[in-house]
Structure formats: structure tokens, C-alpha cells
Image: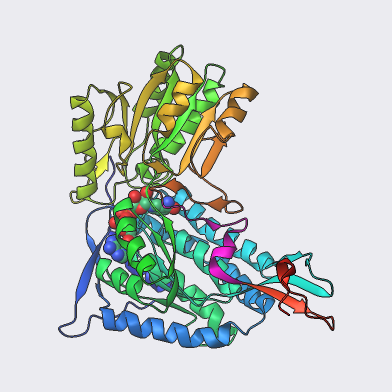
């Protein structure tokens, strides 16, 4: 494996390229360290926001909202267009932060920034399409219609593995809807957040937008908890683990706020006997090992027909044995590091449990040494054959482990597929249209994302993104997900000289 070049220098260069200055830690103030997963080295020490500071930022966002909501939606769209142009201009600079902090290979980091650009384009079009419906009134001389209004302050809490795109999905849509945004990024990727937010700040300032339309608060869960508890946060959009969602959801509900939860996944693909296996194997490997298995949509369970399971496992083992693992900045690397040592320990513990439950590790599942990166956590992706019944497969381990199980008929495969608590993404590889349709039908996959002949990861921004069950039920990004960021008013207008009552009520 190759040596990791100095991540501290790389971080300093990336900050300078965007003209971003890091906030200083005040004397005696709370702080936290940022480590790069590439080497395990500390690349920054940043101030940690306390509850009072978070509340002050939310108060500024609330004040900015009173102006921002009156700006016409297409004019708000023009600001998002300018932001998108800045993202295009600085795509490589921003991607380098994603690599340094989340450990993504360059192609995937560039893909993450492209996703931000795409959602800006989508939001610009949306700014002229925030349609309300009209309905026929049951009363003569009356008109019935819906109007959509901005909601208020949107709080965004994001996870380390999509350190910029998740915020952009929320923010581009929230801004055209007329909301203001306070972002608490992952404590593992705050430089990406500061760099991304600096570009939006530039677009907002050039448009003369009020101060406070977009703000970042830094810190770990305490900063997040303050945002969650604040009654002025009208919508709390939180992306992260099921554990986090279970803590956040009840707090927001208790204050009658709205929440949009995007939580863990435990995604599966079914491989049917008719599948095009060359295509399936490519799709499976990308979904299972891309981002080192650290995508919410990563493929974790493979349910293969018993007539082809040995062939599929043999093909996958050959592909796994050749995977280039190492510094994600190097050309040719396909598997970068896990986020930290804890993550590697969790992966190894899950493999231990899999063995104890009758699993057989076919290939991978080992710690990998990379020169100059002693503090990092590189691993070889694991392919594990599992019996039909086991506990470990029901849990999301945020690392590259693919459990392979077999089935004999499609009903059994769908039952196995749906038997986990999470409900994010799913796939079937088949050339049989009946099977494909069955998988997409009401008694098929129970997930928010249901694919045919592609893997579970790599969604486009045009669709609504999110999942069911313990994945949280939220939807963000494309389609009509914008409705979560607005409030609806139903208007009844009487243009007659009479006052008939609904349901024919006669009130004398
Ligand atoms: P995490 O839950 O540890 O942290 C996510 C964010 O929540 C961080 O910003 C953290 O500071 C904050 N946080 C944690 N506890 C909190 C609390 N009690 N109150 C308020 N904020 C709190 O998750 P992670 O390790 O950063 O990310 C990995 C997880 O995120 C995986 O489970 C993955 O599946 C999930 N994820 C889901 C999606 C999706 O769209 N469904 C997308 C990306 C990641």
C-alpha cells in the first residue's frame, strides 16, 4: 500500500483555495478536534457551540425569515442559481474536503458535489413551480384553493458520510421555499461544512439577502440537541443513525415541531435465476464496497436463488480479491478508509458475531495497513455466507460487509428482504418482468427506494429520497419533497351575495 501524503498540508491548501478562515477557539472555550480518516491525524481544532450560541443563531435565522419569506420565489431561485454556479466553479476544491474528512475516493467526492449542483438546478426550476391545487367548491359562487407558504427556520443535522450533499438537498429546496436554514454538520466533517457554507454565503451576500438566511453551528451532539429543542426551529431535518433519530424524533414531536428523519438502512438485493450476472456483479460490488460500505444505501444483504448462489459468490470473491484499497486520493483506489478506529472495531465485532451465528467469511474482513497512516482504519471489504436465520444481518453495521443468503422461491426472498427493521433501499436483479413488477408492487419491497437491475446505492436527486420503518419515513430532494418545507393554507373565497354553508347546514 502507498504512503499517505501529509493530510494537514492538504487541508490547509484546500482552505486557502476557497479563502476560508477557520474560527478560533476562544480562551477557555469548548473545542473539538477534527481527524482525517486518511491518516488519523488531527487536521483542525474548532470551537464547539454551546446551547446559548445555538439559540442566538436560530434567533438571527428567525429574524432573517421575516424578510426572506417576502422575496418572490423566483428571485430566491436566482440566488440558488448563483450558488450552483459557484459550486460548479469550485467543484474540485470542495471535493477535496469530502475526501479529506469522509475518506471518499476522488470520483465519489466529485459525485457528491455534482449532486449539490444538480439539486440547485432542480430548486431553480422549482422556484417557479410551487403549485397549489384548486378544487371545485360544493357551494355556488365559491372558489376553493390551496396556497403554500414558507415554514420558518429549518434546522439541518447531517451525518459524516455525506458531509455536504445532504445539507445542499435540504438547503436548496428550503431556500426557494422561503425558509432560512441553520446547519449542524457532523463533528467529523466541519471543514467541508465551512467551505460549502462559504460559497452559499457569497451568493447570498451578492444578492443582498439579509444576514442569517444560512448559518452553521459547529459541535457534536450537544449542539445538535440545542437545535432539536429550539421551538423556533419549525422543521428539523436530521440525517444519521437510528439511535440518533430515536432521540431526536420524540423531542421535536413533544414541542409539535416537524421532523424529517433520514436514518440508517440495511439494504438488500435479490438475485433471481434469470439475472444478467455480469451486470448484477458490477452493480453489487459498487453498492457493497463504494464509500467503503459507508453509505446509508450501501448493499448489506444479498439474497440469491439457490441455483446460482455458488456461481455468484465465486464471481464476487474474484472481484473482491482484486479491489484496490488505500489512500482515496490516489488514482485507481476504489476502497478508502473507514471513518475511524471505532468503526473498524464495530466491523470486526459484527464479523465475529456472524461467525458465531454460523456464517463463513469467504473473503476480506481484515484490517489493512497503509504506509504513513498508522492512525487510520483501512479494511478489506468482507463477503460472508450466512444461514437463512441470524441476528447480525438485521442490524446496520456501517462498514463494507456483504452477507449472502439463498432462497428457493420469490415469496420467501421477499419475506427475507423485508424482515429487517430498516426500510431504505432495495434492488432486484431479474430479466423476468413478472418478478420485477412483483418486487415493486404493494406486497413486494417495503422500502422507500425500489430498484430493478441496478444496485441499492447511487440515487438521483430528481426522485424523493428516503425510507420507511426505522429509516424514519422522511423524504427529501426531488419530486414533491418540497412540501415538507412549506405550510399549506386552504382558501375558500365567496364571490356571491349569498352565504350558503358547507354540508347544506341551515343556520336560520
Ligand atoms: P450519527 O447518528 O452518529 O450522527 C449524525 C449527526 O447527528 C451528527 O451531526 C451528530 O452530531 C448528530 N447527533 C447525534 N446524536 C444526536 C442527538 N441526540 N441530538 C442531536 N444531534 C445528534 O451518524 P453518523 O455516524 O454521522 O452517520 C452514519 C449513520 O447515518 C448511518 O446509520 C447511516 O445509515 C445514516 N445515514 C442515513 C442517511 C439517509 O439519508 N437515510 C444518509 C446518510 C447517513
Location of ligand 1 given as a quarter of the image: bottom left
Pinpoint residue 149: horizontal percent, then vertical percent: 61, 75
Image quadrant holding the N terminus, namely top left
The part of the image, by quadrant, that contains residue 406 is top left
Q: How is the image coloured?
A: rainbow
Magenta span covers which residues?
472-488
Q: Is residue 444 above or below residue 508?
A: above
248 sits left or right of 71 in the view:
left
Front one among 116 and 35: 116
Q: Is residue 321 above or below residue 78?
A: above
Front one among 106 and 420: 420
Q: Residue furthest top?
A: 307
Q: Residue furthest front?
A: 508
Q: Residue furthest left?
A: 28
| Residue 153 shows in the view | yes
Pinpoint residue 255: horizontal percent, then vertical percent: 37, 72
Total numbered labels: 0
Q: Is residue 485 magenta?
A: yes
| Residue 14 shows in the view | no
Front one among 355 and 231: 231
Image quadrant holding the C terminus, namely bottom right
Q: Residue at x 18, y 26 (%)?
A: 356
Pinpoint residue 143: horizontal percent, then vertical percent: 78, 73
Q: Residue at x 37, y 33 (%)?
A: 323
Pinpoint residue 35: horizontal percent, then vertical percent: 25, 60
268 sits left or right of 439 in the view:
left
Q: Is residue 352 above or below residue 129?
A: above
Q: Is residue 92 magenta?
A: no
Amino acid at each position: 500500500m502507498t504512503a499517505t501524503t501529509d493530510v494537514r498540508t492538504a487541508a490547509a491548501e484546500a482552505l486557502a483555495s476557497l479563502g476560508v478562515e477557520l474560527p478560533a477557539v476562544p480562551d477557555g472555550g469548548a473545542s473539538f478536534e477534527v481527524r482525517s480518516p486518511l491518516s488519523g491525524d488531527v487536521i483542525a481544532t474548532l470551537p464547539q457551540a454551546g446551547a446559548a450560541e445555538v439559540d442566538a443563531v436560530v434567533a438571527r435565522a428567525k429574524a432573517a425569515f421575516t424578510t426572506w419569506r417576502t422575496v418572490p420565489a423566483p428571485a430566491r431561485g436566482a440566488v440558488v442559481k448563483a450558488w450552483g454556479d459557484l459550486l460548479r466553479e469550485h467543484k474540485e476544491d470542495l471535493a477535496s474536503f469530502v475526501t479529506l474528512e469522509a475518506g471518499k475516493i476522488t470520483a465519489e467526492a466529485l459525485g457528491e458535489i455534482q449532486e449539490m449542483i444538480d439539486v440547485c438546478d432542480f430548486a431553480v426550476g422549482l422556484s417557479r413551480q410551487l403549485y397549489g391545487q384548486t378544487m371545485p367548491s360544493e357551494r355556488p359562487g365559491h372558489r376553493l384553493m390551496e396556497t403554500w407558504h414558507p415554514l420558518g427556520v429549518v434546522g439541518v443535522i447531517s451525518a459524516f458520510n455525506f458531509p455536504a450533499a445532504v445539507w445542499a438537498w435540504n438547503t436548496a429546496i428550503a431556500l426557494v421555499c422561503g425558509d432560512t436554514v441553520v446547519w449542524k454538520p457532523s463533528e467529523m466533517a466541519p471543514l467541508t461544512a465551512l467551505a460549502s457554507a462559504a460559497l452559499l454565503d457569497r451568493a447570498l451576500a451578492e444578492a443582498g439577502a439579509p444576514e442569517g438566511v444560512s448559518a452553521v453551528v459547529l459541535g457534536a451532539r450537544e449542539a445538535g440537541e440545542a437545535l432539536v429543542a429550539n421551538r423556533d426551529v419549525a422543521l428539523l431535518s436530521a440525517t444519521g443513525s437510528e439511535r440518533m433519530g430515536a432521540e431526536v424524533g420524540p423531542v421535536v414531536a413533544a414541542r409539535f415541531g416537524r421532523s424529517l428523519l433520514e436514518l440508517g438502512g440495511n439494504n438488500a438485493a435479490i438475485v433471481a435465476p434469470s439475472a444478467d450476472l455480469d451486470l448484477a456483479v458490477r452493480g453489487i460490488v459498487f453498492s457493497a464496497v463504494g464509500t467503503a460500505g459507508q453509505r446509508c444505501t450501501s448493499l448489506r444483504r444479498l439474497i440469491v436463488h439457490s441455483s446460482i448462489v455458488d456461481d455468484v459468490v465465486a464471481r464476487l470473491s474474484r472481484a473482491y480479491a482484486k479491489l484496490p484499497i488505500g489512500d482515496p486520493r490516489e488514482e485507481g483506489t476504489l476502497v478508502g478508509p473507514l471513518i475511524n478506529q471505532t468503526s473498524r472495531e464495530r466491523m470486526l465485532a459484527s464479523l465475529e458475531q456472524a461467525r458465531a451465528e454460523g456464517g463463513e467469511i469467504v473473503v476480506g474482513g481484515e484490517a489493512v495497513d497503509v504506509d504513513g497512516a498508522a492512525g487510520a482504519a483501512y479494511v478489506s471489504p468482507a463477503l460472508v455466507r450466512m444461514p437463512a436465520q441470524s441476528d447480525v444481518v438485521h442490524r446496520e453495521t456501517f462498514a463494507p460487509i456483504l452477507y449472502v443468503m439463498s432462497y428457493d422461491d420469490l415469496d420467501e426472498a421477499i419475506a427475507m428482504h423485508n424482515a429487517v427493521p430498516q426500510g431504505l433501499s432495495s434492488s432486484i436483479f431479474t430479466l423476468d418482468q413478472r418478478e420485477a413488477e412483483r418486487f415493486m408492487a404493494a406486497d413486494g419491497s417495503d422500502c422507500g427506494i425500489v430498484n430493478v437491475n441496478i444496485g441499492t446505492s447511487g440515487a438521483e436527486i430528481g426522485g424523493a429520497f428516503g425510507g420507511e420503518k426505522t429509516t424514519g419515513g422522511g423524504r427529501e430532494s426531488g419530486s414533491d419533497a418540497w412540501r415538507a418545507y412549506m405550510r399549506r393554507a386552504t382558501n375558500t373565497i365567496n364571490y356571491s351575495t349569498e352565504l350558503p354553508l358547507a354540508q347544506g347546514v341551515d343556520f336560520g
